[in-house]
Amino acid sequence: MGNLGIITGQGNIVDLALNLLERQREEFYIIDLTGGEVLKRFPHCPGKAFGAGQVGSIIKTLKRAHVDRVLFLGKIDKRVLYKHPRVDLRAAKVLLTLRDFSDDSLLNAVIQELKKEKIRLVGQKEVLGDMIPPSGLLAGVEPNRKTMEDVAFGFSMALEIGRLGIGQTVVVKDRSVVAVESLEGTDETIKRGGALAGPGTVVVKVKRPSQSPLLDVPTVGLRTLEVMEGVKARALAVEAHETLVLNLQDIDKRSKKSGISLLAVDEAFLASWLASL
């Protein structure tokens, strides 16, 4: 078996996962897509920094490092396609084959390019499965009926947005959608929803139905909670069995002080709750 390659973006999940792999004595090679920030934090690890558009160079480097498995970690901001559109020849060829630049289209194209080189993708669930919760109240305060009504409404809306390939997150208040995630990411969506609707918003985050389970697993953590505190949101609901929840113990302590509820929900859980009314 060859080495494990780690393609890293932004976010706390990167450091958590790399520290976990080191404790497990896993040998890995880092492809750093953050401008070298990850390699600065892990200077003892082999790796190299690249731009997101250097697909050909990245694959050549992985092959030279005898990588036969790749794990993607962190947020790779799609806005680089618009701000810094420089790509190498292999990336340009891939982009020309796509019917659109949706997250699913781009990620599936990456999977196919790696498969051509006999490089297998490792799912984040394989490495971080203990951080993916079942349904129930995970942290913070017990939600009231009004909050749960917004959670149920927001969950159905988030699934519809996901089916359209737009984003993973919606912000709702009084059973009305006030913000929908697109390119800007979850944190900015929460801020926009709070600015529009004021205190008491509910944030719901789900997996897009069509997205690969190998890439872009929905993730929340302390940073998400900090942003919610800033807009005085009252609850965060994530999709059970599908979402990585980082630093849950720290979130529990902080969310209790903030009066925020953190729940993992799915259709069965919400149907059971509605039936109990």
Image (cartoon, rainbow, N blue to C red):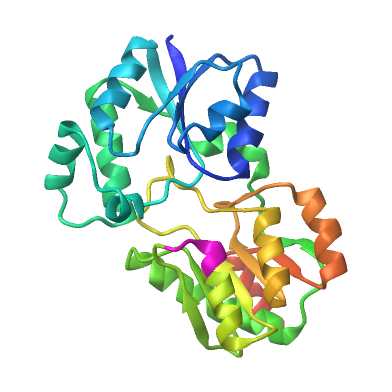
* In this picture, residue 264 sits left or right of residue 102: right
Q: Position of residue 259 (x, y in %)?
A: 82, 73
Location of residue 258 by image quarter: bottom right
Q: Residue at 66% of width from left, 68% of height from top?
A: 236
Image quadrant where residue 21 sits = top right
Residue 275 seen in the figure: no
Q: Please tell me which residue lies in front, 272 or 175.
A: 175
Q: Please tell me whether residue 185 belongs to the stretch shown in magenta.
A: yes
Magenta extent: 184-188
Q: Position of residue 223 (x, y in %)?
A: 67, 56
What's the residue at 15%, 55% (across, down)? Answer: 99
Magenta stretch mostly in which secondary structure? Answer: helix
**Does residue 193 show up magenta in the picture?**
no
- Image quarter (top left, top right, bottom left or bottom right) of the N terminus: top left
Q: Where residue 170 sits in the image (x, y, percent)?
A: 51, 73
Please name the residue shown 70% across and 20% down the image.
23
